[in-house]
Image (cartoon, rainbow, N blue to C red):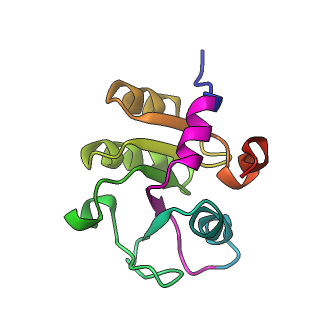
Amino acid sequence: MGHKNDPAVVERLMRTKGRWAIVGLTTNEWRAAYDTSLFIRDRLGMEIIPVNLPGEPVHGEAGYRSLGDIPAEKHPIDVVDCFVNSQKVGEVVDQAIAVGAKAVWLQLGVIDEAAAERAKAAGLDVVMDTCPAQQAWKYNL
């Protein structure tokens, strides 16, 4: 049996102000992460931390090459939002566990049941195969 998103967890993560590390967020305006990260920051009121291979800033926010590169003053990380393909997301989930993140959110189309189980076993909340911008209407956000 695969992972099922708990609506209460989805709502809590979207309503509770916190810090979201967005892995795969770049300056490429054509990628889904670009607009979704603005929604997370500007509509949901979260602090966002771009994580991308060059470590470049996005939306005026300092960027980092990996979750492990995010400095201590930017911790705790409440949610690691994963805009990477399913074949690569397991490594990101393992990094999220290692840095003490509280939750992982695998975006629409990003599915890795084994990684979700590892995250749950480590005590993280898990949301998989959905997007906060597409869920917000359900919670009047």
Residue 82 spot, x, y in % from top left: 51, 53
Task: Tell which of 72 and 66 is nearer to you.
Answer: 72
Tell how many labels: 0
Residue 61 spot, x, y in % from top left: 44, 79
| 89 to 2, vertically: above or below | below
Q: Residue furthest left?
A: 72
Q: Residue furthest right?
A: 137
Task: Tell which of 138 and 133 is nearer to you.
Answer: 138
Quarter of the image for residue 120 reads: top left
> Which residue is found at the position 43% from the left and 42% from the top?
103
Residue 76 spot, x, y in % from top left: 30, 53
Task: Tell which of 74 and 119 is nearer to you.
Answer: 74
Task: Tell which of 24 and 41 is nearer to you.
Answer: 41
Q: Is residue 20 magenta?
A: yes
Which span of residues is magenta-colored?
Answer: 8-28
> Which residue is found at the position 39% from the left and 34% from the top?
124
Residue 71 visible in the current orientation:
no
Residue 14 spot, x, y in % from top left: 58, 48
Quarter of the image for residue 74 reads: bottom left
Q: Is residue 132 magenta?
A: no
